[in-house]
Amino acid sequence: MRSLISRSASLCLAAIPLGFPFPGIQSTVAVAATQPPPTTKRPVVTEYHGTEVAEDYRWLEHAADPEVIDWTRQQNAFSREILDASPNRAAIERRLAALHSQTGRTYGDVKAAGNRLFAIKHQPPLEQPLLVTLRSLDDLGTERTIVDPTAVEVSGTVSIESYFPSPDGRLVAVILAQGGSEQGTLHLFEVDSGRRLGDIIERVAFPTGGGSIAWERDSTGFYYTRYPRSGERPEKDLPFYEQVYHHRVGTSDSIDQFIIGWEFPRIAEVFLATSRDREELLVTVQKGDGGDFAHWLRGSDGNIRRIADFPDGLKPGLFGPDGFLYFVSKKDAPRGKIVRIPAHAPTEERQTLVVPEGAATVDGYSWRGLEIVPNFAVTLSGIFVTEIDGGPSQVRVFDLEGKFKHKAHLPAVSAVDQLTSLPNNEVLYRVGTFLQPHTWYRQDLAEPSGKPTVLSESEDPEMREFEVVRETAKSKDGTQVPISVIRKRGLRLHCENALLLTGYGGYGVNLVPTPVSAKVKIWLQSGGVYAVANLRGGGEFGDDWHKAGRLTKKQNVFDDFTACAQHLVQRKYTRPSRLAIEGGSNGGLLMGASLTQNPHQFRAVVSHVGIYDMLRVELDANGTFNVPEFGSVADIVQFQALLSYSPYHNVKNGTRYPAVLFLTGENDGRVNPSHSRKMTARLQSATTSRRPVLLRTSGSSGHGHGTALSERISQEADVLTFLFDQVNLPFRTPASGKK
C-alpha cells in the first residue's frame, strides 16, 4: 500500500537549491557577497598502518605563529563583515541583553555546611556568577556574598570553577580561573568577612581532569588534587598525573603532604570525598573520559587500600550518614543499581545490594563545575535516587533497606538535578522543564511531594504559548531514538517551519529537559521550532546506550541524528531548506560529521568548540583523555573507524555544503582551537554553494565555562543572526509580533 505521507513527505524533502531565496519571503543575508580570505595550501602526507593520508592545512595548528594569528584576524574580520551586514544583528543583541536581565537571579550548586547554605548565584547584568551564603531556604534576606569574581578582575574574565565549604561553614576553598581556561588556582576565603586568606595553591585544576577538594572533619585542613609543577615531571606531562595532597590551613603549600597518586594513570581524573564522622578519605579516579572508575579509601588509621578497580563497574560514590559507602554499580546492571560497602571494612565480599536495577536508568553522576557529583542522596532514613528514561527523569525514594516508598511528584517531561542532602534529614533538589525556570524543592522520606523553596525562579508567562512533544525516530539499524520537540501550541505541520535541531551523543552524557536559553526563546518566539535528540553515545538508556555510540560504533551516533532530521521532515515539521543544526564540543564533532555525510540535508550548521580532525586529536595535550571514548590511531581497527567519519578528512571538493558558523575560544583547553581553523579552511576551499563558511574566534573565552556574560550575549547574537538569515526566519519580538 502506498504510504499516506508519500506526497507530503516528498514535498518536504524537496530542498530549494542552495543560494536561492524562498518563494514569497524576502531574502536577507543568505548568500555570501564576498569571498573569504585565501588560505595557503601546504600539503603534508602521514602514513597510518600503510594508508597515506594527505592534508593541506596542518600549518594552522601552530597558534603562536604570526601567520596563523594574522589568518585568524582576517577570518574574524570576514565573519564580522557578513554578520554585521544583517539588519537583524543589533536588534537581536538588544533583545538578548534584555532577556538575560529579565531572568533575574538564579541559584545552582547548592551545598550545606555548618548551619549555612552555599550557592552559586547568577545575577545579570554581572559578568560572572557569585558565591553566596544564606541561613534559610525560606528567607532570601539572610543572603550574603562571599566571593564576587569581578572584584578580583573587573573585566569579568575571572570565574569561579568550583567551591568547597569547610564542615563548620567558617571557611570556603574556591577554585578560580582566568579567561575560561579552566586552569584553576585554589584560594581560601573566610565566610563571615569575605576576606581572602593567604592560602593560595596553584595547579589544582586543569581542563577535563578537573580538580577536587575535601575537608577534614575538624575544618583545620583539607585534601586537594594537584598537577605536577615544573621540575617534577617532563614538560609534556605537566597537564597529566593528577595527584592528592594534604594542606593545613594557615601554612605554606611547600610543606603539604603527598597522599596518593603515583600509581594513577597518566590521564587520571581525581575526585575526593571525606566522611562526616570519621577521618576517612574516598579517592575516586576516572581513567580519561571513558566512564570507568577505580576507588581508594584512606582509613582513619592513615592506611590506603584500593576498594574497586576500573573493570568493577562502580561509579562515583558518597559517604552515607550511617557509616557506609554508597555507589551506583553497573556491574551486570547496565541501567544501574545502588550498592553499599561498610566504610570501616570495605571489601568486595561485604558489598551488598540496596536498590536493584529497574526499568529506568539510575542517573549515576553529573558534572558541577569541575566536580563529579553522584545523582543520589542518602539521609538517616532513606535513599533518594534520580532515574532517567530516555531524557526525562524521576526521583524514586527508598528506605535504607532498599524498600520502595514512593516516587516524587514532578512535572511532565522534566528533569531533576543537583540532589543534595541537608542536615535535617531532608534532601534538596532542582527540577527543570523545557518551558519553565528551575524550581528548588526540599523533601523528606515521608512526603511524596517536595516543598518549593525561595531559591526557585519565577514562572515565565511568555512560555505558556509553547508545548513539548515527544517524538521517536527510527535509526538506520532500527533503533528507536527519542526527540523532544518544543513548538508553539497549535503549530501547523506544513513543511515550512524553520527548525533548529541539536544533539550530543557521547561520554554517557544525558540531554535532559532544562529551561530553554534566552537564545532558544527568541528562536521560538520568532516562529521557529526547537528539537533535542537523545542519541546513542549518551546515557539516557544506560551503559549499553553509551557503548553503542563510542569507539568503533561512533557512526551509530551520526546515523541516529540523520534519522531524527529525516523523521522531523517526514512528519512535516520542516524541510531541508529550513532545517538548521547546532552542537558543541563532542556535539561539534556531530555537526562536522553530519554536514560532511549529508550536506544537502541541512540549510545551516552552527558548531561550537568542535573536534574535526579525528586522526590528530589525541596528539593535543587534552586529546589523550578522549581516547577511551573515540579510540586511537595506534589501533588499526580504531584508525579505520576514525578515518571513516573524521569530518576534516571527509570534506569533498566541489560539494554544495550548507552555510556553517564555527565558534571557538583561544583559551580552550579541552578542544584545540586548531580544529576549527583547519575545518574552516578546508570547507571554504571545497564548497560550491556560495553559502558562507565563517569562523568566529573569541580571545577572552575557552570551552564555554567561565565566559563573561557580555561575551556570551555577543556570541548568541551572532549565532541567531546567522541562523535567522540562513533559513530566512524573520526576527520578531513578542510585543510587536514584527521585526
Image: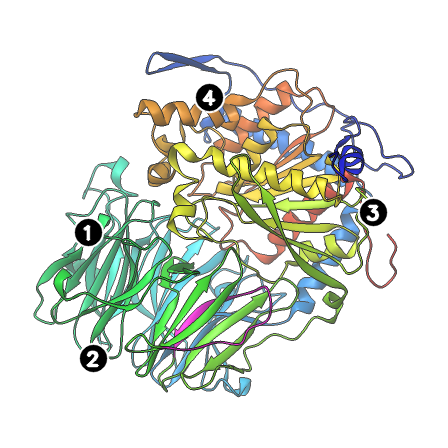
Task: Identify the image quadrant of residue 347.
Answer: bottom left
Q: Amino acid at mark 2?
A: Asp
Q: Which residues are magenta?
A: 404-421
Secondary structure type for disc 4: helix
Give whichever of discs 1 and 4 has the lower sequence position: 4
Is there a contact, CB below 8 Å, between mark 2 and mark 3?
no
Mark identifier at residue 730? 3
Q: Residue at x 79, y 55 (%)?
A: 491
Give whichever of discs 3 and 1 has the lower sequence position: 1
Q: Amino acid at mark 4?
A: Arg
Q: Give the main secondary structure of the magenta stretch.
A: strand
Of residues 739 and 366, the one drawn nearer to the viewer in this rendering: 366
Q: Amino acid at mark 3?
A: Pro
> How far separated are the C-alphas under marks 2 and 1?
26 Å
Instruction: Judge from the rendering whether residue 398 lies leftward or rightward of residue 666; answer left or right.
Output: left
Mark identifier at residue 58? 4
Q: Residue at x 82, y 45 (%)?
A: 494
Comparing marks 3 and 1, which lies closer to the viewer?
1
Residue 283 in the image: state x and y as whole percent: 22, 60
Q: Amino acid at mark 1?
A: Asp
> How far separated are the C-alphas under marks 2 and 3?
61 Å
> How far separated are the C-alphas under marks 4 and 3?
39 Å
